[in-house]
Image (tube, rainbow, N blue to C red):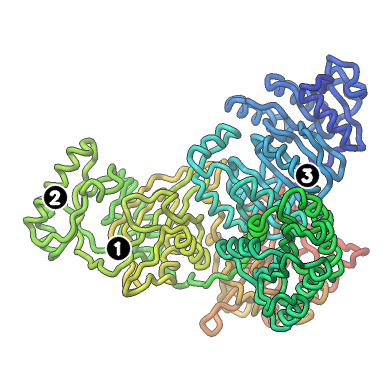
């Protein structure tokens, strides 16, 4: 990822248009027109051998003739000329290029990508509309219209959607900080743009239109970082298989299940909308209210009962909440609404309300402490034009202190009578919608975004010490199977591997023939279950490969012969390994579940949860990305229930969801630790008496082929390899390890234990103790771009944090900023050296160019330690601080 190159791309000093034209039907004509009309202050240089001037601007016959090197070039010629033009631009030291042309084949795209890399070019496109930077007057696009400066950034793979959004935004007076059409994303992609926009002060919210993603891990890392600081709204196409194929044909890339994209978007803390209508609503809401809502309940003020009922229905059906008005507020409303003996939420002031009554009721609700979110619904009134009510709303809202002001939305119903009123509200900074349902839908976007953000910062319960897994023996067992050429492990072979991770499997015996099956069953005791073992048959029960309640040897032998006969008729080519015999487990009153691991070509391993059955695809399951902790496992279960793939049943005993969460975390850890597992299925998984028992399991394994261009997991898991025991100067033993989300409470206690002097040295001033949200960000980190090491030791049977070091890498991997703080009572134990050296070693492995830190001049201990470890130390007299710099990876 490179924020630096995007910053350069988005700050052009001069622009060349290659293929500029005076022909109105050519892209070069429109791009030149847009640039000239946009108000860009730098040189605009048309390049064409056909004209002496384009739009009255002197043209140059070729790139070599340009009077200066353009900082940005827009190529508007056909696809056959692109490679040669890129070479000519590179010869002039131009590094930033937009390619408009569409219709490139896969081979041409690959060739163009390699060509750009060889030349060191930064490419936006191809198959794109171009780029708009309104605050710089840059409209380097093939757009039919312009946009004004604003606080939203929009990134889209579809040029057609870009044009639609621009048209709509112009009508709604909505502006943009950046408007980027990325097209096929051959070079510049969503991840880099999110890294840039997440740090951009002008951008308050980001909107994405995505067909396909290429660098999944880079995207989710950048999206998570951006979503922590501002809303990120996504419309992702390809919800159906046919739609996914159409998206692939449109912009290339790979196709993955829509359910997996859903899991990614929620895991990153973004919000997904279903279609353009919802995207428009979200755009309008975010343009005028980009901040996170404080609370969820909504208050409704209306002059018509019917629309209010529509709004309430829509709100509650979307799992929203109505605000409860206080007795004081209700009394004040009753005093100004004489027709009503008892006001309530929704507050109906009736259709005969004049503007004065309207304003009085609005003031009461705006001043009510319990009203944090307010929807105002207005139907056309004969007493005054809708515009008059709109002006009252804008003026009354503006009079409220912005620090106390509720979030206000309006719905002016109708068309002709409502158009100007909606325009007045929009110009007054108040989101406005055509229908009650549309207003509530936009409001719920903000609520769902708030909920996703809360998911990001909830502290999971720690069960790390309870897992007691044996990863090394599991790997040894897998290696042994692979050495014998065994890639499909049925229940009896999978059971030992699962046992190493605390997953219980029913006792299973094996027989190769019907007669042997009868003998084995007799030794086990009856009743038994007989199951076919075949790697070629995914669902044994569908072909009669499972027979229950066999009560003697004869029944077992006859059932085995019958299974073989059925398989010979239906799957004559199937490879039969034999039979498994299991004791019959009572299943009455139990809940049968299914957990699976599937390896997606883009996302790597994903976890599926659903009901036991013959088939489990992504549409029949809730999906999550590993790694899971207890909180994330809880959300997976909730998602399965919301989706209807995990049903609440009337049983003597409910499924123990806590233990199910723990089981899911074990399965997650198994797939993290064992890269040779690419498919796993536990089906059925019997939930009974608070326990879980696997009745049937299969695991598919193969030697994991590490690919340089793709990480195995979409999200980097906890880097356990960095754990190590250390001996402190007092001779005591401690553990140095990366921080985990479960460490929040211990981190809070550590923060609260610091003396004022230590906090001042760490934060360069008086700092209040951290809130839950701040601590969550410190403990729930993205290991791909930041690291925090802690030293812990046991105190009264729980982990106590002694010190912390942090390094935060910039997206370019050029600089990592470090900071260290040691507990006031643990100084002098050598913790500073241990923690700083761990940070340095980690940055070296990550390929970071240099490690840098800042401290106060009186922090002599930190300064001396930095010198001993090779840092260059220099004093910033203006700031009164000490800068410490250590170059790394310079070879």
**Label 2: which residue?**
560
Question: Residue 867, relative to residue 752: is it above or below?
Answer: above
Question: Residue 320, relative to residue 560: is it above or below?
Answer: below
Q: Nearer the viewer, residue 6 or 317?
A: 317
Q: Position of residue 451 (x, y in %)?
A: 61, 64
Q: Nearer the viewer, residue 877 or 837?
A: 877
**Label 1: which residue?**
505
Outermost residue, left side:
554
Query: What residue is rendered at 51% in x and 55% in y?
Result: 625
Query: What residue is rendered at 36% in x and 52% in y?
Result: 478
Outermost residue, bottom side:
796
Question: Residue 580, relative to residue 351: is it above or below?
Answer: above
Q: Earlier in the sequence, mark 1 or mark 2?
A: 1
Left or right: 365, with 447 as reference point: right
Badge 3 marks a residue whose secondary structure is helix
Assess whether mark 2 and mark 1 are in contact (beta carbons under 8 angstroms).
no
**Label 3: which residue?**
171
Q: CA distance from mark 1 to mark 2?
A: 23 Å
Q: Nearer the viewer, mark 2 or mark 3?
A: 3
Q: Earlier in the sequence, mark 2 or mark 3?
A: 3
Q: Nearer the viewer, residue 879 or 464?
A: 464
């Amino acid at each position: 990822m490179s924020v630096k190159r995007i910053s350069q791309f988005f700050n052009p000093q001069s622009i060349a248009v290659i293929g500029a034209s005076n022909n109105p039907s050519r892209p070069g004509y429109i791009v030149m027109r847009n640039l000239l009309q946009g108000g860009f202050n730098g040189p605009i240089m048309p390049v064409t051998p056909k004209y002496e001037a384009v739009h009255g601007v002197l043209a140059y016959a070729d790139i070599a003739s340009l009077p200066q090197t353009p900082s940005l070039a827009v190529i508007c010629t056909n696809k056959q000329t692109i490679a040669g033009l890129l070479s000519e631009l590179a010869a002039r030291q131009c590094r930033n290029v937009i390619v408009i042309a569409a219709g490139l084949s896969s081979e041409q795209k690959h060739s163009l990508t390699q060509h750009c890399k060889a030349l060191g070019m930064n490419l936006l496109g191809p198959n794109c509309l171009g780029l708009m930077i309104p605050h710089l007057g840059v409209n380097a696009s093939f757009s039919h219209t312009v946009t004004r400066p604003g606080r939203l950034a929009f990134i889209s793979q579809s040029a057609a959607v870009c044009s639609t959004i621009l048209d709509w935004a112009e009508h709604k007076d909505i502006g943009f900080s950046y408007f980027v059409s990325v097209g096929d994303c051959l070079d510049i992609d969503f991840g880099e743009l999110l890294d840039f926009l997440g740090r951009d002060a002008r951008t308050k919210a980001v909107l994405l239109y995505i067909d396909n993603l290429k660098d999944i891990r880079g995207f989710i890392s950048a999206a998570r970082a951006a979503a922590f600081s501002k809303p990120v709204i996504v419309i992702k196409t390809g919800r159906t298989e046919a739609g996914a194929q159409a998206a692939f044909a449109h912009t290339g890339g790979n196709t993955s299940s829509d359910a997996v994209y859903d899991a990614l978007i929620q895991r990153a803390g973004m919000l997904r909308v279903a279609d353009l209508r919802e995207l428009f609503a979200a755009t309008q809401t975010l343009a005028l209210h980009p901040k996170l809502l404080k609370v969820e309940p909504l208050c409704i003020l209306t002059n018509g009962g019917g629309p209010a009922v529509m709004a309430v229905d829509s709100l509650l059906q979307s799992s929203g909440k109505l605000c409860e008005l206080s007795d004081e507020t209700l009394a004040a409303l009753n005093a100004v609404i004489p027709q009503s003996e008892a006001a309530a939420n929704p507050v109906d002031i009736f259709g005969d309300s004049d503007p004065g009554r309207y304003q009085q009721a609005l003031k009461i609700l705006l001043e009510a402490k319990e009203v944090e979110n307010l929807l105002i619904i207005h139907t056309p009134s004969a007493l005054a034009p809708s515009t008059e009510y709109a002006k009252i709303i804008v003026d009354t809202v503006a009079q409220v202190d912005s620090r106390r002001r509720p979030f206000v939305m309006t719905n002016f119903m109708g068309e002709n009578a409502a158009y100007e009123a909606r325009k007045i509200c929009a110009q007054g900074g108040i989101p406005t919608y055509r229908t009650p349902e549309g207003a509530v839908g936009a409001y719920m976007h903000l609520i769902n975004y708030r909920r996703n953000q809360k998911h990001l910062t909830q502290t999971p319960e720690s069960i790390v010490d309870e897992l007691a897994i044996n990863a090394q023996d599991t790997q040894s067992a897998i290696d042994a199977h692979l050495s014998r050429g065994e890639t499909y492990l049925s229940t009896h072979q999978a059971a030992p591997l699962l046992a190493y991770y605390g997953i219980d499997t029913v006792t299973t015996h094996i027989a190769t023939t019907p007669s042997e099956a009868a003998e084995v069953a007799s030794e086990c005791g009856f009743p038994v279950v007989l199951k076919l073992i075949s790697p070629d048959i995914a669902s044994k029960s569908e072909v009669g490969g499972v027979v229950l309640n066999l009560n003697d040897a004869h029944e077992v032998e006859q059932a085995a012969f019958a299974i073989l006969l059925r398989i010979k008729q239906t799957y004559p080519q199937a490879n039969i390994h034999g039979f498994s015999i299991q004791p019959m487990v009572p299943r009455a009153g139990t809940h049968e579940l299914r957990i699976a691991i599937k390896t997606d070509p883009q996302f790597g391993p994903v976890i599926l949860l659903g009901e036991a059955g013959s088939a489990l695809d992504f549409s029949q399951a809730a999906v999550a990305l590993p790694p899971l902790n207890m909180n994330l496992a809880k959300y997976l279960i909730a998602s399965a229930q919301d989706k209807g793939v995990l049903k609440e049943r009337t049983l003597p005993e409910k499924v123990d969801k806590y233990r199910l969460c723990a089981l899911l975390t074990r399965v997650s850890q198994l797939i993290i630790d064992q890269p040779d597992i690419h498919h796993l299925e536990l089906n059925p998984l019997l939930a009974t008496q608070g326990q879980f028992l696997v009745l049937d399991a299969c695991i598919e394994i193969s030697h994991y082929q590490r690919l340089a261009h793709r990480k195995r997991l979409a999200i980097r898991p906890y880097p356990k390899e960095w754990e190590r025991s250390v001996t402190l100067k007092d001779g005591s033993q401690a553990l140095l390890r990366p921080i985990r989300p479960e460490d929040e409470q211990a981190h809070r206690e550590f923060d609260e234990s610091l003396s004022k002097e230590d906090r001042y040295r760490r934060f360069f001033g008086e700092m209040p103790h951290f809130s839950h949200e701040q601590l969550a960000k410190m403990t729930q980190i993205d290991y791909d771009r930041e690291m925090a090491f802690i030293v812990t030791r046991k105190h009264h049977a729980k982990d106590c944090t002694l010190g912390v070091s942090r390094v935060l890498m910039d997206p370019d991997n050029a600089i990592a900023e470090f900071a260290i703080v040691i507990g006031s009572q643990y100084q002098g134990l050598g913790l500073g050296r241990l923690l700083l050296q761990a940070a340095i070693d980690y940055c070296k492995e990550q390929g970071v160019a240099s490690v840098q830190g800042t401290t106060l001049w009186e922090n002599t201990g930190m300064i001396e330690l930095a010198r001993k470890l090779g840092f260059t130390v220099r004093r910033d007299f203006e700031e009164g601080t000490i800068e410490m710099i250590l170059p790394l990876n310079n070879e």
